[in-house]
Image (tube, rainbow, N blue to C red):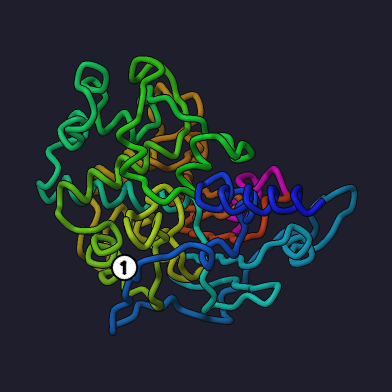
């Protein structure tokens, strides 16, 4: 028995040195992930932008929502779905803001794949500044370690639209899959060197986090600035974010920002990013993200059956669009109604968040 216990203990120690061990130790992603990984700081500016708060702007919320066979009121629905924060803003005025389960307006929440939309904005800025030539540039221009005979036809736009043809397993439940390796691994740049292709670019839509990680590395190599500092300089400070944020990294020794996820911030500051896109990349009269770049994010690539473009999800019939992260993190933007909504939660626990956002937007 002692020998067996020693072997088990030794095996666990061995596993703890790799991403598989960390996967089993921490298991599935949760809202404490911002505390599990090392991170790099993003400083808030001294001058803050704040939304208006007025009791003279009544909000219209569903009187009841059918949930698990019962009709419950909106706030009970938010609690039942393990929502930790919900915010509705119309024309710069907060109509609704509630926190649950001990969360407050100053609690950091992991964004998960909502971070992808921030990375897209940074790429648009880098192109506008001339640091990156265009979306038609081959990614090999920034990755000399990748063989051109295999990767030379893959462009920045292909990875923006999740049509790169690069082989990657996005299964969140597989400890040996690629996404677990990138999420729990400690050397992202080493993994890039081992990439392989599974098909020709632009043939099909395949949502893989690797594409966003590639975008993050391109931005850093093109600008000479680390991703979290570029975000701080180009978005966080200009938007007058109320709080500092941080971006998780692979390890203290390698310090590669996990671009595809792991931007940790507060709900009001996530809402400000939604406002930036609501106003076509313009912030208080200054064009931070090119207008045509935001237009590409708001309208899907016609080849994408999944209504996805430039790291945003769209609903072309309604004209709304959103950033989405696993466990049901959302920044929802509705230009027609001039509305931004943010939902942060411990899990989805509901299959129709987009439909709910649209219904609420249409009555406000």
Q: For the magenta stretch, what is the residue range?
A: 350-364
Q: In this view, does 255 lie to the left or right of 107?
A: left
Is residue 355 inside the magenta stretch?
A: yes
Q: Is residue 122 left or right of residue 164?
A: left
Is residue 76 inside the magenta stretch?
A: no
Mark 1, residue position? 236
Percent x, y of residue 222: 15, 47
Location of the C terminus by quadrant is: bottom right
Say few, some or many: other residues with alpha carbon within 10 Å of mark 1 (under 14 / 14 to 19 / 20 or more): many
Percent x, y of residue 202: 35, 20
Q: In which quarter of the image is residue 153?
A: top left
Which of 331 and 24 lies nearest the eye of the viewer? 24
Q: Which residue is drawn at 33% across and 19% down?
A: 201
Q: Which residue is drawn at 56% across and 74% down?
A: 57
Which of 241 and 177 lies nearest the eye of the viewer? 177
Q: Is residue 332 left or right of residue 28?
A: left
Residue 153 versus residue 134 in the image, above or below: above
Q: Which residue is drawn at 36% across and 38% down?
A: 191
Residue 139 versus residue 15 in the image, above or below: above
């Amino acid at each position: 028995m002692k020998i067996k216990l020693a072997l088990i203990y030794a095996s666990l120690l061995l596993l703890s040195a790799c991403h598989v061990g960390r996967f089993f130790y921490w298991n599935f992603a949760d809202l404490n992930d911002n505390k599990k990984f090392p991170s790099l700081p993003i400083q808030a500016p001294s001058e803050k932008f704040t939304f208006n708060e007025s009791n003279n702007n009544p909000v219209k919320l569903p009187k009841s929502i059918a949930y698990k066979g019962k009709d419950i009121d909106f706030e009970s629905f938010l609690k039942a779905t393990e929502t930790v924060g919900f915010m509705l803003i119309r024309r710069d005025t907060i109509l609704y803001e509630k926190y649950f389960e001990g969360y407050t307006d100053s609690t950091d929440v992991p964004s998960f794949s909502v971070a992808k939309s921030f990375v897209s904005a940074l790429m648009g800025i880098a192109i506008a500044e001339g640091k990156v030539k265009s979306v038609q540039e081959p990614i090999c221009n920034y990755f000399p370690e990748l063989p051109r005979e295999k990767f030379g036809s893959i462009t920045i736009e292909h990875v923006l639209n999740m049509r790169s043809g690069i082989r990657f397993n996005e299964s969140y439940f597989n400890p040996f899959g690629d996404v677990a390796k990138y999420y729990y691994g400690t050397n992202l740049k080493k993994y890039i060197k081992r990439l392989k292709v599974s098909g020709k670019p632009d043939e099909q839509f395949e949502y893989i986090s690797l594409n966003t990680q590639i975008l993050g590395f391109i931005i850093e190599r093109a600008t000479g600035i680390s991703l979290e500092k570029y975000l701080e300089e180009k978005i966080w400070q200009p938007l007058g974010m109320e709080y500092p944020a941080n971006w998780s990294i692979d390890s203290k020794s390698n310090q590669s920002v996990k671009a595809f996820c792991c931007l940790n911030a507060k709900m009001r500051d996530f809402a400000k990013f939604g406002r930036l896109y609501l106003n076509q990349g313009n912030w208080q009269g200054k064009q931070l993200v090119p207008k045509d770049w935001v237009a590409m994010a708001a309208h899907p690539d016609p080849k994408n059956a999944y209504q996805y473009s430039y790291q945003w999800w769209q609903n072309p019939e309604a004209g709304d669009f959103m950033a989405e992260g696993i466990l049901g993190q959302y920044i929802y933007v509705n230009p027609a109604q001039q509305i931004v909504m943010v939902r942060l939660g411990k899990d989805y626990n509901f299959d129709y968040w987009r439909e709910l956002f649209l219904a609420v937007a249409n009555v406000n």
